[in-house]
Amino acid sequence: MSNDATDRLLPRRLAVESVALGATALCVLAAGYWLFTVLAGRPLAIRWLAPTGALTAFVAGYAWTHRGTLRGLDGTRLDSLGLANGITLARAVLIAAVAGFVVVDVEGALLWAPAVGYGTAVLLDGVDGAVARTLGTETRLGQRLDMAVDTTGFVVAPAVAVAWDLLPVWYLLLSAARYCYRGGLFLWRRAGGSVGTLPPSRLRRPLAALQMAFLTVALLPPAPTPLIRTVAPVVLLPSLVVFARDWLAVTVSPSKY
């Protein structure tokens, strides 16, 4: 049997875990819909559920599509998602719940939901990796999911902040940065250019953490919006510069960066 065919066969334990995670996600969506209905009415609950459900389905599809990468870093195929990947998927559901607030205007207790949801996902960002390293369960799938969830968070959180007029619209450049980076590399290859290996950087993770913290604060109801909007360019610019530097590092002369 080919490796591709083998990857398509789910071990029993993994199949049970997948069903359990899917059922849990549906329960979370149902609970969120019910809470939204109680606090804001059914029309707003439906509007919230549409993007939230769509993003949850996308994440589930992404994980399923890449199930063949559920392997240890040494290439050993695993029969369980593991606790760390479960935490990463929980982060994804939290960010999906925040996504629904892009299209709804709320008041009262629901004003806190985006900051609490995204902030919790941010706190868990350091937990999943630590758990994987501690338990020795680091996987290629986990690495893919972690990057995908972080990137999705950098789309969703700024989108909510801009939709609620908490951040200026140009802060969405952060949301577009990684896609521009990947698109630029694609066009560079199509033009015949070579792409090198991205060198290590001491700036990427600290700047990502800074963005996560800033976005969480920006979404907090008590945060002073005029001050947040004033500080925004100072926080955004270094991240954009690093994306540009990384693009140059892999397309021009890696040794110079």
Image: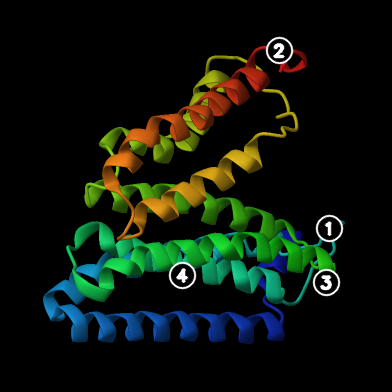
Q: Residue at x 71, y 12 (%)?
A: 253
Q: Between tags 4 and 1, which lies in front? A: 4
Q: Position of residue 52 (x, y in %)?
A: 33, 67
Q: Which amino acid type corresponds to the residue marked 1 in the rendered image?
A: Gly
Q: Is residue 93 left or right of residue 44?
A: right
Disc on res. 253: 2
At label 3, counting other C-alpha atoms closer than 10 Å, the crowd grade (few under 14, some 14-19, many 20 or more) is few
Q: Which amino acid type corresponds to the residue marked 2 in the rendered image?
A: Ser
Indicate the quadrant containing the N terminus: top left, top right, bottom left or bottom right: bottom right
Q: Which amino acid type corresponds to the residue marked 3 in the rendered image?
A: Leu
In space, the residues marked 2 and 4 are separated at their CA atoms by: 39 Å
- In-front residue for pair 13/238: 238
Disc on res. 135: 3
Q: Residue at x 70, y 85 (%)?
A: 13
Q: Which residue is mark 4?
A: 93
At label 4, counting other C-alpha atoms closer than 10 Å, the crowd grade (few under 14, some 14-19, many 20 or more) is many
Q: First in sequence: mark 4 or mark 1? A: 1
Q: First in sequence: mark 1 or mark 3? A: 1
In space, the residues marked 1 and 2 are separated at their CA atoms by: 31 Å
Q: First in sequence: mark 2 or mark 4? A: 4
Q: Which amino acid type corresponds to the residue marked 4 in the rendered image?
A: Val
| CB under 8 Å between discs 3 and 2 | no
Q: Position of residue 208 (x, y in %)?
A: 57, 43
